[in-house]
């Protein structure tokens, strides 16, 4: 009887340990995927440049900016071409998308308003981009919710992304 009780205690300890390990492992995978998505966004925004053909612009739910786009297939040597990277939020599908277009595609296909990009993060409840600029009159840095190519003559000093995810999301 004592051996039976010891066996049940050992089984219970192992079973609970494995269950906790699985939950922690799944949470870390989700966090790692979100961290990787933000690393990509950060890299793309840091590598933007001023280009007269494609302006940096954005609002609360989307951002467009010039970048070098790799046009080669994944198995080939990279070939870069000027283009535009877009990140946009679809409230209905709760998804943050990324879309890359080469310079000719930008003017042939027009502006992105539909979910035609690659899913970057799913399970997004709320998302907001805001843009930092230097106010030349006060010398202070301020944030605003849109960056309009007609009103601004440069790229913002920084971009902030506010993100709220649903519970137990896996991107």
Image (cartoon, rainbow, N blue to C red):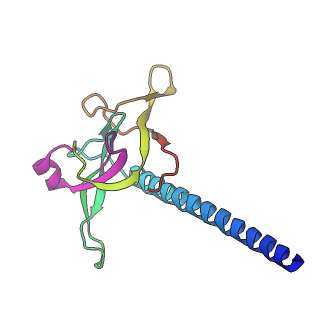
Furthest-left residue in this view: 108
Q: Residue furthest top?
A: 137
In the image, is 122 to the left or to the right of 111? right
- Magenta residue check for 103: yes
46 is within the stretch colored magenta: no
Please name whichever residue, 56 or 49, is drawn nearer the observer in this view of the structure.
56
Where is 63 relative to 120, above or below? above
Rendering coords of residue 48 (x, y %): 36, 50
Q: Residue furthest front?
A: 1
Left or right: residue 123 compared with residue 66: right
**Quick one: quadrant of the C terminus?**
bottom left
Report x, y in % for residue 33.
49, 59
- Answer with the quarter of the image where residue 103 lies: bottom left
- Depth check: give the residue in front, 58 or 37: 37
Picture residue at 43% right of the left edge, 37% below the top:
126
Foreground residue among 56 and 123: 123
Residue 137, image x and y in percent?
A: 45, 19
Residue 52 in the image: state x and y as whole percent.
Answer: 23, 44
The furthest residue to the right: 2
| Occupied quadrant, residue 23 | bottom right
Q: Which residues are magenta?
A: 86-112
> Could you tell me which residue is drawn at 63 percent across and 61 percent down?
24
Residue 90 against residue 102 in the figure, above or below: above
Q: Is 2 left, or right, of 54 in this rendering?
A: right
């Amino acid at each position: 009887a004592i051996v039976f009780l010891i066996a049940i205690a050992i089984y219970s300890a192992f079973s609970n340990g494995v269950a906790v390990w699985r939950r922690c492992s799944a949470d870390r995978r989700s966090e790692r995927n979100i961290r990787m998505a933000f690393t990509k966004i950060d890299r793309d925004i840091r590598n933007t440049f001023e280009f007269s053909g494609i302006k940096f612009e954005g609002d609360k739910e989307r951002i467009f900016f010039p970048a070098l786009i790799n046009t080669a297939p994944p198995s080939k040597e990279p070939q870069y071409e000027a283009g535009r990277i877009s990140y946009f939020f679809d409230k209905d599908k709760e998804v943050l998308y990324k879309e890359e277009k080469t310079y000719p595609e930008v003017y042939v296909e027009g502006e992105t308003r539909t979910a035609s990009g690659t899913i970057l993060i799913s399970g997004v409840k709320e998302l907001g981009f805001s843009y930092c600029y230097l106010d030349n009159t006060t010398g202070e840095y301020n944030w605003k919710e849109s960056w309009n190519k007609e009103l601004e003559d440069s790229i913002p000093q920084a971009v902030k992304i506010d993100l709220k995810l649903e519970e137990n999301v896996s991107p």
